[in-house]
Image: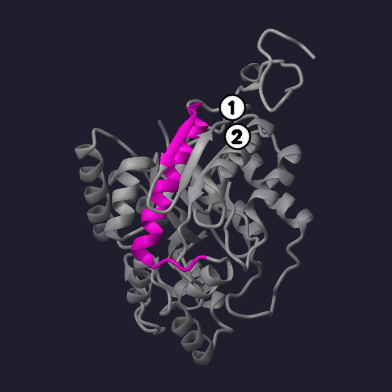
Amino acid sequence: MGLHLFWFLPTHGDGRYLGSAQGARKVDHGYLQQIAQAAERLGYGGVLIPTGRSCEDSWLVAASLIPVTQRLKFLVALRPGVISPTLAARQAATLDRLSQGRALFNLVTGGNPDELAAEGVFLDHAQRYEAAAEFTHIWRRVLAGETVDFSGKHLQVKGARLMFPPVQQPRPPLYFGGSSDAAQDLAAEQVELYLTWGEPPARVAEKIAQVREKAAALGRKIRFGIRLHVIVRETTEEAWRAANRLIAHVDDETIAQAQASFARFDSVGQSRMAALHNGSRDNLEIAPNLWAGVGLVRAGAGTALVGDGPTVAARIREYADLGIDTFILSGYPHLEEAYRVAELLFPLLDVAPNTGVAAHDAIRPQGEVIANDFAPGKVH
């Protein structure tokens, strides 16, 4: 079937160096449009749009890029705890309809205590996953066309439903990443694609086996994806020089401050990322061609595949052999690196074509809705 390769929209900022304002860029709509259109023309299947208070709003960014793209899919953040599941389902259906079936959703429970508190979420890790499971249960059923009554520990809805269904049926796919037992249980029960950050292949294999077993126990099969940075050049020596250049302006104090901040997160995945480097510049190649330097100052995905095209392609195939079919990639700066990755890697991989969704016939004509309901058989 081929590999699904996605790119990344840097709505939190972009530039040539991590942890430094040197070489920083103005990330406005024009720049994001450049990256999105480049990704589409180069053959990426979609773009991940990040979430958090350091980012522009992912839903608005996706909506703004619909008219300037044709096939590109948008993977946007779904945030339980900060929005009602019924409203989130309506927004999801709208984005899917307006984009002609190009909407994908990434469930994000959050792990930064300061950010969660600022958004009014004061649940601990276990409670957040309880609430997220209830949220997702309602969201999925409403998008699938059901009228939902639900009374849970954290959420209650009565008569929740959609009037305008999504294009993708029974609903747009739901992606989700989390390393804790609670996260894996949620993934096994309710999502279509489980994402992991770029850990060494043996550790990724363990997570995939755990989630696959839990899903099978529920009679389900799910797909797998991975989030990685890529530093690919014509020679491996050049790629490693580029990796070292990326953190050339990061000093030890900046690393210490970043790691102290990340240590406050209650995210198991973030803890696993931090353990790969322990805040030290020493021994950053944690597996063949897998470099943990990004995670010294960046939360979330903190590893990069480094090497020439054939070497990085071989490493990607190693992950694919574990059962991963979706690779969400990025590189600094994101415009130029989108081209490098496509030019140096795509010819060496079995890349699934981005054919888009033929959705025009899926949206039927209808008259105006009256009295908050449909008037079957009538045109107003």
Relative to 100, is 348 on the left or the right? Answer: left
Evaluate if marks 1 and 2 touch, with contact meaning CB atoms under 8 Å apart: yes
Is 157 part of what is drawn in magenta? no
Residue at image point 58% right, 79% down: 19
Quadrant of the rendering where the N terminus is positioned: top left
Name the amino acid type tagged 2: Ala
Q: Main secondary structure of the magenta part?
A: helix
Q: Which residue is mark 1?
A: 165
Q: Position of residue 138 (x, y in %)?
A: 45, 40
Q: Is disc 1 surrounded by few (<14), some (14 to 19) or many (20+) residues within 10 Å?
A: many
Residue at image point 66% right, 57% down: 57
Is residue 355 at least partly visible in the picture?
Answer: yes
- Residue stretch in magenta: 121-150
Number of residue marks:
2
Q: Nearer the viewer, residue 333 or 372?
A: 372
Relative to 336, is 311 on the left or the right? Answer: left
Residue at image point 77% right, 55% down: 29
The answer to whether residue 294 is above or below residue 104 is below
Q: Which residue is mark 2?
A: 93
Name the amino acid type tagged 1: Pro
Is residue 45 at least partly visible in the picture?
Answer: no
Residue 317's label in the rendered image is none
Residue found at the far top of this picture: 377
Q: Secondary structure at mark 1?
A: loop
